[in-house]
Image: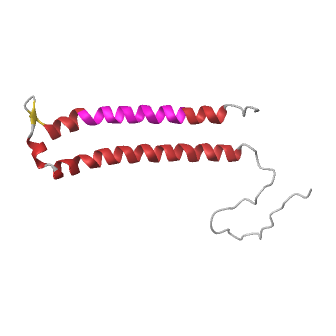
Amino acid sequence: MTERVTVTVPGARRRGPRRRPPDEHAEPGAARVRSLIRAQARLALATLTIIFLLLAGLPMLFACAPGLSHVRLLGVRLPWLILCGGVQPVWVVAAHRHVRLAERAERAFTEPARPE
């Protein structure tokens, strides 16, 4: 097997990002690591989307139903109660769910493949 050699001209500068030549004998776990990173990125995007839709939905809810913004509970208007006391539990639940699912993906990655 021949070794690859990069030939350069002295004083010449490379432009753009350095690209490594494809290696047929790359580390076998590299594809698994990339799949773990993709899975966790999809999970983060899903969590972000859920939180965004819930929080962006609040102003739309009060715009579509203006009577709700005049409802008072314990002397405080409903929008303020939701913003002060209802958003934090959503953050906590979403964060807990995200961490649980991310850890599950990591466990699936680190467990050796079981022969069937």
> Whole-percent x and y of residue 84?
21, 35
In magenta segment, residue 88: yes
Q: From what the image shows, is residue 60 above or below residue 103? A: below
Apparent side of residue 41 relative to residue 59 in the rendered image (left or right): right
> Whole-percent x and y of residue 113?
72, 34
> Whole-percent x and y of residue 58?
23, 46
Dominant SS type (magenta): helix
In which quadrant is the N terminus drawn?
A: bottom right
Residue extending farthest front: 116
Apparent side of residue 73 relative to residue 106 in the rendered image (left or right): left
Q: From what the image shows, is residue 17 above or below residue 27? A: below
Q: Which residues are magenta?
A: 86-103
In magenta segment, residue 24: no
Apparent side of residue 80 relative to residue 55 in the rendered image (left or right): left
> Whole-percent x and y of residue 4?
84, 60
Q: Residue 72, located in which quarter of the rendered image? A: top left
Apparent side of residue 96 relative to residue 57 in the rendered image (left or right): right
- Please report the residue visible at 67 percent of the width from the left and 31 percent of the height from the top: 111
